[in-house]
Image (spheres, rainbow, N blue to C red):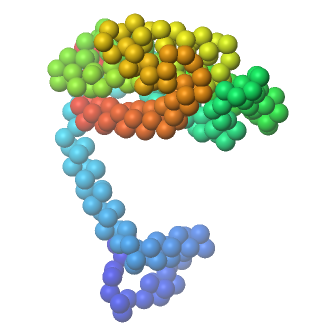
Amino acid sequence: MSLERKDEYDHNAWLKERDLSVVEKTYLMTLIWFDRRFRLVDYLEILENMYYKINLQMPKSHTEQYNLDNKFWYWYPLYALGSFSVIAYLVAALTGALLGFYYAPSTAGTPPESYALLTTIMADQNFGFMLRSIHRWSAQVMTAAVFLHMLRVYFTGAYKEPREVNWIIGVILLALTVGFGYTGYLLPWNQLAFWAGQIGVEMALAVPLVGEWAAQMIFGGFSLGQPTLQRMYILHVFVLPFVVTALIALHIGIVWMQGIAEPH
């Protein structure tokens, strides 16, 4: 339905002529109100035209080319690993944001304040134990799904031309996913986190030429402390989410344009 923009046109009279329910009238009146001020219909028509033009350029998938839509192929579950990892990422992001209301990075006190806050979340907050468990397991599921997704892409040859750029983006996403897991692993600041951080410092120092600089930059020095936990928190909450989200959007966009590289 197109909305006319003439001043003399009475939309209320038009609505009265139609036998519409209260919900339908409310919806149409709201649409008319917004359309008069923001030209919503015009922009929706532009988006609709863009959508159809883009879809005309979409390459056909293997199932579309060979009319296999009604057949189930044994490898199809492996093609859900990418979307499965995105879902796990969204769940981890949502639960992590909720946990952030109660967590603060601090190594002060005995036990450390961060660890005390974690135990408070799990023991005292409503659904705290469940929330933390969902966050932890979704992060582990995401890591496993991304790794298996990369194996599937490699063994089916889906990294070859013209998909080599998306393969490189996927490798970067795998590395960032591991970084996500490592930074989050250190946030509880318990014994496991402390010694995992110490291993990270030793690995950074083992890198030739830039090892000491890397240890100073990432861990805040050669020994663990408040600067280490602060850096892990900033990376986990303020840096990696934006970088990973942008790369995931780019990755999915390229897949959408090129189509899924299904095996023949």
Residue at the spot x=30%, y=56% of the render?
A: 48
Residue at the spot x=67%, y=42% of the render?
A: 101
| Residue 123 against residue 73 in the figure, above or below | below
Residue 51 lies left or right of residue 248; in this view the side is left
- The number of discs equals 0
Residue 128 lies left or right of residue 16; in this view the side is right
Residue at the spot x=52%, y=9% of the render?
A: 199
Look at the image and tell me in which quarter the N terminus lies.
Answer: bottom left
Q: Nearer the viewer, residue 75 or 108?
A: 108
Residue 1 lies left or right of residue 84; in this view the side is left
Look at the image and tell me in which quarter the C terminus lies.
Answer: top left
Tell me residue 222's x, y (percent): 50, 16
Residue 3 lies left or right of residue 87; in this view the side is left
Tell me residue 182's x, y (percent): 52, 19
Let me know if residue 49 appears in the view: yes
Q: Residue furthest right?
A: 124
Tell me residue 88's x, y (percent): 53, 28
Q: Nearer the viewer, residue 24 or 232?
A: 232
Residue at the spot x=35%, y=90% of the render?
A: 7
Let me know if residue 17 appears in the view: no
The part of the image, by quadrant, that contains residue 224 is top right
Tell me residue 160's x, y (percent): 20, 17
Q: Residue furthest left?
A: 161
